[in-house]
Image (tube, rainbow, N blue to C red):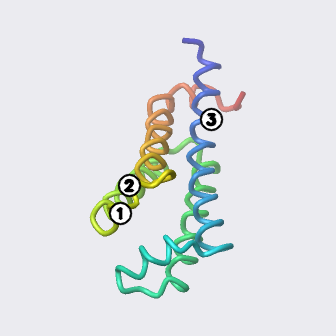
Amino acid sequence: MDTRLLRRIHLAARAVLAFVFIYHGLVPKILWLSPIETALTSIHGVDPTVLSPLAGGMEIVLGVALLAWRGSLVPVYAALLLLFGLLLDVMIVMPGLLAEAFNPLTTNVAAMFAGYVVIVTQRHANAHRHWA
């Protein structure tokens, strides 16, 4: 496959993964605290008005790191671990969410696939220092 095309696929997958973290960190945790976020945080006995914005800020930082450190897979692996861990948490503490129209299973699996694409295309993305 054409190296330029693989670099573009890589960058697109990295951008999608970053978007997921930036959006989910900002909108349902900081701008408008989602009732689902509140319920998930409360189940763990933590004040959602404190933890959710803090977690949202950390997600935004991870999203920015995914874009800023394009030569590194460290933020990608961190994102994959976080997505998997959060999905496991939902499966254990609120499995009913998995039956909802927009749910953590479909969102996290799709984001994990984007992370997989980033990993398998990384060597092509690093083949040249400029990004096409």
Side of 5 where 82 appears, left or right: left
Of residues 17 and 128, the one drawn nearer to the viewer in this rendering: 17
x, y percent for residue 72: 51, 45
Residue name at image x 68 percent, y 73 percent = 31
Mark 1 and mark 2: span between their CA atoms? 8 Å
Q: Which of marks 1 and 2 is nearer the N terminus?
A: 1
> Quick one: quadrant of the C terminus?
top right
Q: Do the residues labelled 1 and 2 touch (CB within 8 Å)?
A: yes
Residue that carries the numbered disc 3 in the rendered image: 11
Considering the numbered disc 2 on the image, is that residue within a helix, a strand or a loop? helix
Residues packed near mark 3 inside 10 Å, few (<14), some (14 to 19) or many (20 plus) = many
Residues packed near mark 2 inside 10 Å, few (<14), some (14 to 19) or many (20 plus) = some
Residue name at image x 57 percent, y 50 percent = 66
Of residues 112 and 131, the one drawn nearer to the viewer in this rendering: 112
Residues packed near mark 1 inside 10 Å, few (<14), some (14 to 19) or many (20 plus) = some
Considering the numbered disc 1 on the image, is that residue within a helix, a strand or a loop? helix
Side of 42 where 67 appears, left or right: right
Q: Do the residues labelled 3 and 1 touch (CB within 8 Å)?
A: no
Residue that carries the numbered disc 1 in the rendered image: 90
Amino acid type of the residue tagged 1 in the rendering: Val
The disc at residue 98 is 2
Residue most extreme to the top:
1
Q: Are marks 2 and 3 in contact (CB under 8 Å)?
A: no
Observer-side mark, 2 or 3, equals: 2
Residue name at image x 54 percent, y 25 percent = 124
